[in-house]
Image (cartoon, rainbow, N blue to C red):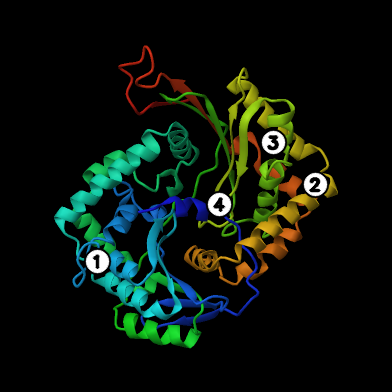
Amino acid sequence: MQHLVAFILLGFGFAALVDAEVSAYRLDNGLKILVKPDHRAPILTSQLWYRIGSSYEPAGLTGISHLLEHMMFQGTENLAPGEFSRIIAENGGEENAFTGRDYTAYYQNLASDRLEVALRLEAERMRHLKLSEPEFLKELKVVKEERRMRTEDDPQDLTYERLMAVAFDASPYRNPIIGWPGDLDQLSLKDLRDWYRLWYAPNNAILVVAGDVDPEQVLTLAKKHFGSLPAETIHPPRVSPEPEQLGEKRLQVKAPAKEPYLLMGYKVPTLSNAAEPWEPYALEVAAHLLAGGESARFARDLIRGRQIAASADASYRAFERLPGLFMLDGVPAKGQTIEALESALRDQITRLQTEPIAPAEIERVRNQLTAAKVYERDALFYQAMQLGLLETIGLDWRLADSYVEHLAQVTAEQVQAVARRYFITERLTVAVLAPQPIAGDKGSATTRAGGQTHVY
């Protein structure tokens, strides 16, 4: 599957939904339905979101949600492997899926008169998936290769994976979405069948349709195809509260790489769990103030100005089920050290905490964020994605309407307040990638892919 969409999803912001009202329904079996009409073109996107992702997985089963996503394309009681995709293509559409920490979602983009095709196929695989041993073994091999290429052979992604595992002691966000290698080795077809039966049920799903559609027609078709599917007794697993961090954590990752890499993460709340409702918006403004384009502080001061960094970034995800991390990362410029880069990033955090932020700088970030959010609302796919993500993580989909307004109300004082409250050493984890010789380079013929992690 194409999982780049998941990463785009996890970083994007929300635009105001003002063109049309969203119609909300719930079937007797618990299926939630959200319909967002947009009649600018005769097209639609149909998305089915399940409240299941890597943060629901217990020890020993990491990666099972992502593997099940692969299996959803490998045949049902009435469809041969690959037939789902073939039918969508024959109807002029495109389809795919993505797995995140808190969700698994499937989508089809089609002409508006082909909605019933998508709903019929999704209803078929919601409760009638055919999980066979040969297809399971094939897809498990595909997932292991995907993990090798995207994580184990990518030193920066490997560093991120190991930082998450060290930063969180109890939170399930410490586990990678794709799963740990040892868990993938021991997953069985029975594990997959049990996982599918438990979570892939109408009362654990949200159907979102956006485009040139009539809400009542969507409801009629949803009843026709999903209405007879039985609900499941759902018992979401308890989440262990993350214990208080008692000091800065540091780790070194030794892996084949051409250049060193620095990754820093401060534990912060999200919209689902913030002490004050304005804090996540202030954290997003802080991220863009530091690294929101060529006029932001990192680009102006560290890359072009002092030329300490070849690259530097800041990122934050407000829309997650559990508390997360405010991330800083970078690569030192030629002739600079990783220590100099870390010192410079820390100086930028101190400056954010102590120096008054100019009104013009806050206004620039507000305008930048607002323009980006408003631009995104032109895409049907992201209109639907906004609604599906909010509902899946337990937030009201109506929050999409007020997101830009909340960002516009963030003050310089609030940005400094969250920086002082959360950007402290007791919430910080620092990971340093220490490059090792790459296989094939001169003098490194015996070096293999993979790496080592040292926590100190």
Q: Quadrant of residue 270?
A: bottom right
Q: Position of residue 9 (x, y in %)?
A: 51, 56
Residue that carries the numbered disc 4 in the rendered image? 11
Q: Position of residue 77 (x, y in %)?
A: 18, 71
Distance of label 4 from label 2 (alpha carbons): 22 Å
Q: Position of residue 416 (x, y in %)?
A: 75, 45
Distance of label 3 from label 1 (alpha carbons): 49 Å
Q: Is residue 308 left or right of residue 215?
A: right
User: Closer to the N terminus: mark 4 or mark 3?
Assistant: 4
Q: In the rendering, which numbered label is found on residue 361?
A: 2
Indicate the secondary structure of the residue bearing disc 4: helix
User: Closer to the N terminus: mark 2 or mark 1?
Assistant: 1
Q: Nearer the viewer, mark 1 or mark 4?
A: 1
User: Closer to the N terminus: mark 3 or mark 2?
Assistant: 3
Q: Nearer the viewer, mark 2 or mark 1?
A: 1
Q: Amino acid at mark 2?
A: Glu
Q: Amino acid at mark 4?
A: Gly
User: Closer to the N terminus: mark 3 or mark 1?
Assistant: 1
Q: Is residue 370 left or right of residue 116?
A: right
Residue that carries the numbered disc 3 in the rendered image? 298
Residue that carries the numbered disc 1 in the rendered image? 83
Query: Considering only vertical position in the picture, is 351 above or below 193?
Result: above
Q: Quadrant of residue 340?
A: top right
Q: Is residue 14 left or right of residue 295?
A: left
